[in-house]
Amino acid sequence: MTIAAKNLATEMTNYNVEEKDLYGEICITDEHIQNNRSVRDMLGQRGIKPEELPQSEDIKKLERRVKSEEKRLAKKSATLPRLKDGGDNA
């Protein structure tokens, strides 16, 4: 959610830089700060406080956990007993 809000503020800045023909670091930075404040104010009006949202799991941490789980499952499946007749008991 926080990333989406920041992306919205950035896109607003990008739009306004072109639309208002803004130049210079100070001018563009001021525009970006204003857009971030506007987005945060809007979230606040809706009762959303980014600092109170639950943290999202880090993608790298999630990828490591998935790989670990895949390895554990592969190891576990290698230890399953094999059927002597190939599994055709019908």
Image: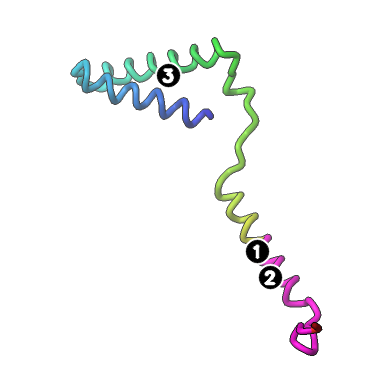
Q: Is residue 20 left or right of residue 73?
A: left
Instruction: Give the residue at mark 1.
Output: 70
Q: Secondary structure at mark 2?
A: helix
> Closer to the camera: disc 1 or disc 3?
1
Marks 3 and 2: CB-CB under 8 Å? no
Task: Please say whether residue 81 is one of the residues in the magenta stretch.
Answer: yes
Residue 30 sits in quarter: top left
Q: Secondary structure at mark 1?
A: helix
Q: Residues within 10 Å of mark 2 (few under 14, many from 20)?
A: few
Q: Residue at x 54, y 10 (%)?
A: 45
- Return the x and y of residue 89 as percentages of the image width and height: 81, 83
Give the residues drawn in magenta, as a range: 69-88
Marks 1 and 3: CB-CB under 8 Å? no
Residue 66 sits in quarter: bottom right
Q: Residue at x 24, y 21 (%)?
A: 17
Q: Is residue 78 left or right of residue 44?
A: right
- Return the x and y of residue 50 as percentages of the image width and height: 57, 23
Q: Amino acid at mark 3?
A: Asn
In the rendered view, tell whether residue 75 sits above or below residue 51: below
Marks 1 and 2: CB-CB under 8 Å? yes
Task: Please say whether residue 86 is one of the residues in the magenta stretch.
Answer: yes
In the rendered view, tell whether residue 44 sits above or below residue 18: above
Q: Residue at x 56, y 13 (%)?
A: 46
N-terminal-most mark, 1 or 3: 3
Q: Residue 36 shows which numbered tag?
A: 3
